[in-house]
Image (spheres, helix red, strand yellow):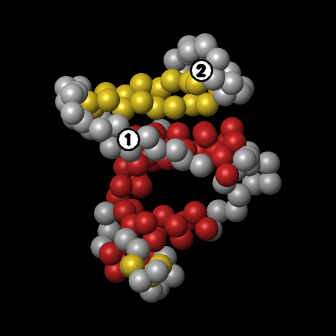
Amino acid sequence: MRTWITRMMVQAALARGDALLVRESGGAPETIRGRTMDPRFQFLQAQARRRPIPPDFGPVQARAATDQMIVLFGGGAEPGVSWQDRSVPRSGEGRDRAPRGRTGADDIRVRIYRPVRPEPEAVALTFFHFGGGVVGG
């Protein structure tokens, strides 16, 4: 199915009223540590639980699934922010040895976000996501 059709179908499904989304997700709002989950997230979670994870689902498949989710749910680019995909050798030797979008087997993929108009006094934020701990560690 074409991506834009799938995206429209997902957006239409999530645009329905909160009560309907909750009902289709099990009937009651889900509360975690005293906080009620957004009905759209609850609906997506319920849909994901209905689909079993294949036994051969590894890091490559996880990355492909994540890329598909970004296409379906990702918004437009944030105004005033540029980004660049890079790779960093695990050994720390050298610089970017792999071309943009392609990494070596041992490289760590990183995405660098920068303001289009940097402020000299701005601080830097580094975020490490332990995604490999979920699939393929």
Q: Nearer the viewer, mark 1 or mark 2?
A: 1
Is residue 123 positioned above or below 15 on the image?
Answer: above
- Residue furthest to the bottom in view is 28
Is residue 110 positioned above or below 21 on the image?
Answer: above
Q: How far across and how far down the image is residue 134, in percent?
A: 66, 54
Q: What residue is at 51 percent from the left and 82 percent from the top?
A: 26
Q: What residue is at 56 percent from the left and 15 percent from the top?
A: 95
Q: What residue is at 69 percent from the left and 38 percent from the top?
A: 60
113 and 24: which one is in front? 113
Three-letter amino acid code at disc 1? Leu
Mark 1 neighbour density, 10 Å: few (under 14) some (14–19) many (20 or more): few
57 and 126: which one is in front? 126
Total numbered labels: 2
Q: What residue is at 29 percent from the left and 38 percent from the top?
A: 123
Q: How far across and how far down the image is residue 129, in percent?
A: 54, 47
Q: How far across and how far down the image is residue 73, in percent?
A: 40, 49
Label 1 – label 2 distance at C-alpha: 25 Å
- Residue furthest to the front in view is 121
Residue occupied by mark 1: 125
Please say whether residue 7 is visible from this viewpoint.
no
Residue occupied by mark 2: 102
The quarter holding residue 117 reads: top left
Three-letter amino acid code at disc 2? Arg
Please say whether residue 102 is visible from this viewpoint.
yes
Q: Earlier in the sequence, mark 1 or mark 2?
A: 2
> Circle 1 sits in a helix, a strand or a loop, which is it?
loop
Disc 1 to disc 2: CB gap under 8 Å: no
In-image side of 65 versus 25 (left or right): right
Q: How far across and how far down the image is residue 13, in percent?
A: 39, 62
Is residue 39 positioned above or below 8 on the image?
Answer: below
